[in-house]
Image (cartoon, rainbow, N blue to C red):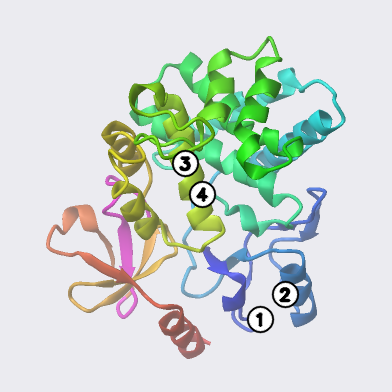
Amino acid sequence: MRLIQIEEYKEHSMQLAKPVYDAKGRVLLAAGNRIHPKYLQKLKSIGVTFLLIEDASSHGITLEEMVDMPTWIDATQLIKDSFERVKLRKVLPIKELQQCVFKLLYEVRKRKAVLLIPSTSVADELQPYAHSVNVTLIALQIGKFLQYTESQQRDLAIGCLLHDIGKVVANRVEEHPEKGFSIIRNAREINLLSAHIAYQHHERLDGQGYPRKISGEDFLQFAQVCSIANEYENMISLHHVTSYEAIERLMAKSDSHYSHAVVNALFKGVPSFLPGTFIRLNTSEKAIVTKIDTHLHRPVIKLLETDEERSLADFPTLIITEELSREEVEEMDETNG
């Protein structure tokens, strides 16, 4: 199994490894199917840009680190429902949100790393809510390396799940953090810290963010965690940046946008090369990443020429120099086909 951009799909050599969901969270195309060109165009028209597929190159890759898809879809639907309730001036579904947080915490605890299902792998109407779930998962992974208590993780999760909820009532995008703060703080069952996470998630350590241009210690670490997770998810899902490049870009923002501690926790918690990624080694050999094992940034790989598996943690002189270009991967797919 591997994750591809929808433009890379080849009907003759690939089939769906995970379902595709429509705007109501229903299965649009089930796993195991090949996608007819007519349906492929339909998926593109509703905003789907990523697919999880199975092909000869990725056979045996299980993506064990990927969040459970039914849990992810249920959480996405709940956030959609929460936003719609606020739009109708109804109360937030607090009990359901708390149950959702419990399930997402479990997903993070049981894995060494959390691989995201890109928010653009579902219909565009669901994508803003899938984004909030992904931000939460990454934030919880960062919080784990910052040694947050379970109570702190719960407050972090609620703040991240609802960080964009102000958008349903804001007239301008710059207003949504403050609007979100007002919505969340009016729910007495939610810790005020969660409301401040929403309020501050577009601030910066150097005071160049919005809406209040706060800086230094006034920029809460919990809000920084939400903010960096927000940036990472947007890079991966919307801009199709590789995980390695996203981490590199965010590390460059240490001490300007985010504290060193937060950036370091992101580096410790998020793998650079995801299973299913085609890479080139410093020996010029081509390989595919098969799993994350003992070291987050030194994965297990399979050499394409010999099918030999190696854990880079055991081969310190082997270095990943780059991800293969789409053209090189497509050329290999044609050869295998």
Residue 55, percent across and down? 54, 73
Q: Tell me how far mark 1 sits from mark 3, CA to CA.
A: 34 Å
Relative side of 15 to 273, left or right: right
Q: Is residue 145 visible?
A: yes
Question: Element under label 1?
Answer: loop
Looking at the rendered structure, the secondary structure element under dot 2 is loop
Name which residue type carries label 4. Glu
Helix, strand or loop status at disc 4: helix
Residue on which the image places disc 3: 229
Tell which circle, 4 or 2, labels the residue nearer the N-terminal end: 2
Tell me the residue that label 2 is attached to: 35
> Looking at the image, which residue is at 72% across and 19% down?
94
- SS class, disc 3: helix
* Residue placed under numbered mark 4 in the picture: 233
The span shown in magenta is 291-306
Q: What is the CA distance from the residue labelled 3 to the residue labelled 2?
A: 32 Å
Q: Which amino acid type is shown beneath numbered disc 3? A: Ala
